[in-house]
Image (cartoon, rainbow, N blue to C red):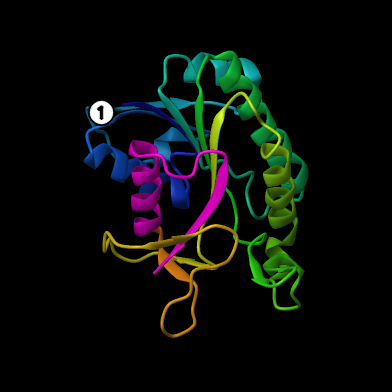
Amino acid sequence: MKIGLIGATGFVGKAVLRELLDRNHDVTGISRHPERLGFRHPGLRSKAGDMLDEAQVVLFMKGQDVVISAYNAGWTNPQIYEECLRGWSTIQSGIKKAGVKRFLIVGGAGSLEVAPGLQLLDTPEFPAQFRAGALAAREYLEILKKEKELDWTYVSPAIQLVPGSRKGVYRTALDNPVYNSEGKSIISVEDLAVAIADEVEKPKHTHQRFTVGY
């Protein structure tokens, strides 16, 4: 497929990019600093772009079969809440104008329910430094649930998303974390990328949020 990947040089984006290229997809990778990617590939077109600019979204995403957004305004950005919401909304409107129907966005784990009626974000243990970004991700999920034109999917990683190795296995759930036998909600970024690529190739969660873990 022809896949537009936004945020291709980030922690999640780079793992997704490698997984897609290994599966022989044609990827247009968009990032603010494509020189940070560190490699070239015949299946990759790497472009510098500002996803707060709708015209650029339309330009780069036109002709894609699927758009994956791993966009993040930056955890140390004091305006992360405002810029994440603006960026995600701009991407959403831009890909519609570009004529793309399938949209997959990598969100956060903060809106997962860790107990009936209690989301992870609202627990005392949730790290303060990630709160603003997690609030934006939770709010955007509610915005996306009202989207009727796009075939969207929202992916929440496990509570612990770590660098590791590609096992090629994972389990899924919808609004509750996936826990392993030790009671941990954890997955490597490499296997998150596997789950994302699998969802792109064989959609199972259209108009849904899903999460993954071991």
Q: Which residue occupies 56% across, 22% down?
A: 95
Question: Is 140 situated above or below 176?
Answer: above
Which quadrant, please, contains the N terminus? top left
- Residue 38 can be seen in this image: no
Residue 210 percent coordinates (x, y): 52, 53
- Is residue 185 covered in magenta? no
Residue 196 percent coordinates (x, y): 40, 46
Q: Is residue 55 left or right of residue 136?
A: left
Residue beneath disc 1: 43
Q: Which residue occupies 68% across, 49% down?
A: 137
Observer-nearest of 18 and 206: 206
**For the residue marked with disc 1, what is the amino acid?**
Gly
The extreme bottom residue here reads 182
Q: Is residue 205 left or right of residue 140?
A: left
Residue 72 percent coordinates (x, y): 60, 45
- For the magenta stretch, what is the residue range? 190-214
Question: Is 210 situated above or below 28?
Answer: below
Question: Is 188 situated above or below 68?
Answer: below
Observer-nearest of 17 and 198: 198
Observer-nearest of 159 and 200: 200
Q: Quadrant of residue 92?
A: top right
